[in-house]
Amino acid sequence: MMTTAQNYRRMVNAGNKIVVGLQRLGVAFGPMQLLTVAGRRTGVPRTFPIAVVPIDGARYIVQAYPKAAWVANARAAREVTLTRGRRTSAARLAELPVAERGPVLRKLVEKSPASVGKRFVTTGLADGATPDAVAAAAARIAVFRVEPA
C-alpha cells in the first residue's frame, strides 16, 4: 500500500514531465527553472525542474523531497546549468551549513503560499507547515545558494 508521500511524489513526477517539456519549448513560469547536473555515478547530465527562490538578495534552491537525486548530484558536481525559458546559465550551488538553513527556510515559508509549508509536511521533511516548524527541520532539508560559475 502506498503512503500519502508516495502518492504525492508520483503526482509531482508526472507534473515535472510537463514542466520540463514546457521549459524546453521556451515557456518560463513562476520561479521554475531546469537544473541540469552531471549524474554523480555516471556523469550523464540529468535535468530536474527546480524552483529558484530569491531571498534577501540571494537566490536559493531548496530540497522538497527526501532522497532527491538532484541533491546528491549537486553535492558531487562543481557546476550546474540553470535554464529558464530559452536562457541558460552556468552556476555553482553552495550548500548552506545546517546552522544557516533555518533563517532561509523560515523566510521561504513566510513569503510563499501556504502550500509551500504543507509540501514539507506531506513529503515528511518537516513536522509542521509553519515557518518555525520548517526552520526547525533544517537538518533534514538541503538548501543551496546559487552562485555564478
Image: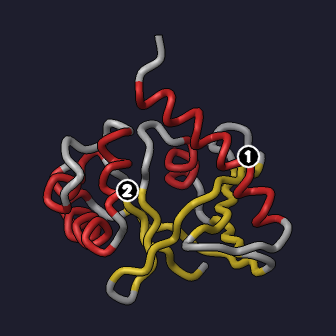
Q: Nearer the viewer, residue 7 or 56?
A: 7
- x 52%, y 36%: residue: 9
Taking the view exactly as shown, the residue that stands out farthest to the top is 1
Q: Eyeballing the image, is 57 above or below 4?
A: below
- x 74%, y 57%: residue: 20
Residue 132 in the image: state x and y as whole percent: 14, 59
Left or right of 38 on screen, residue 22:
right
Q: Nearer the viewer, residue 36 or 48?
A: 48
Q: Dot 2, how many residues are within 10 Å of its Cα: few (below 14), some (14-19), or many (20+)?
A: few
Q: What's the residue type where badge 2 is placed?
A: Ser
Q: What's the residue type where badge 1 is placed?
A: Gly
Q: Determine whether the residue tagged by mark 1 lies in a helix, strand or loop.
A: loop
- x 68%, y 68%: residue: 81
Report which quarter residue 77 is drawn in.
bottom right
Taking the view exactly as shown, the residue that stands out farthest to the right is 25
- x 57%, y 60%: residue: 50
In this rendering, the label closer to the viewer, 1 or 2: 2
Q: Eyeballing the image, is 108 above or below 39?
A: below
Residue 136 in the image: state x and y as whole percent: 15, 53
Q: Determine whether the residue tagged by mark 2 lies in a helix, strand or loop.
A: helix
Label 1: which residue?
A: 43
Q: Eyeballing the image, is 50 above or below 108?
A: above
**Do tag 1 and tag 2 residues touch (Cβ < 8 Å)?**
no
Label 2: which residue?
A: 115
Q: Dot 1, how many residues are within 10 Å of its Cα: few (below 14), some (14-19), or many (20+)?
A: few
Residue 40 in the image: state x and y as whole percent: 63, 43
Of callouts 1 and 2, which one flags the residue occurring earlier in the amino acid sequence?
1
| Residue 118, numbered circle | none
Q: Eyeballing the image, is 55 above or below 96?
A: below
Q: Nearer the viewer, residue 3 or 125?
A: 3
Residue 23 in the image: state x and y as whole percent: 76, 66
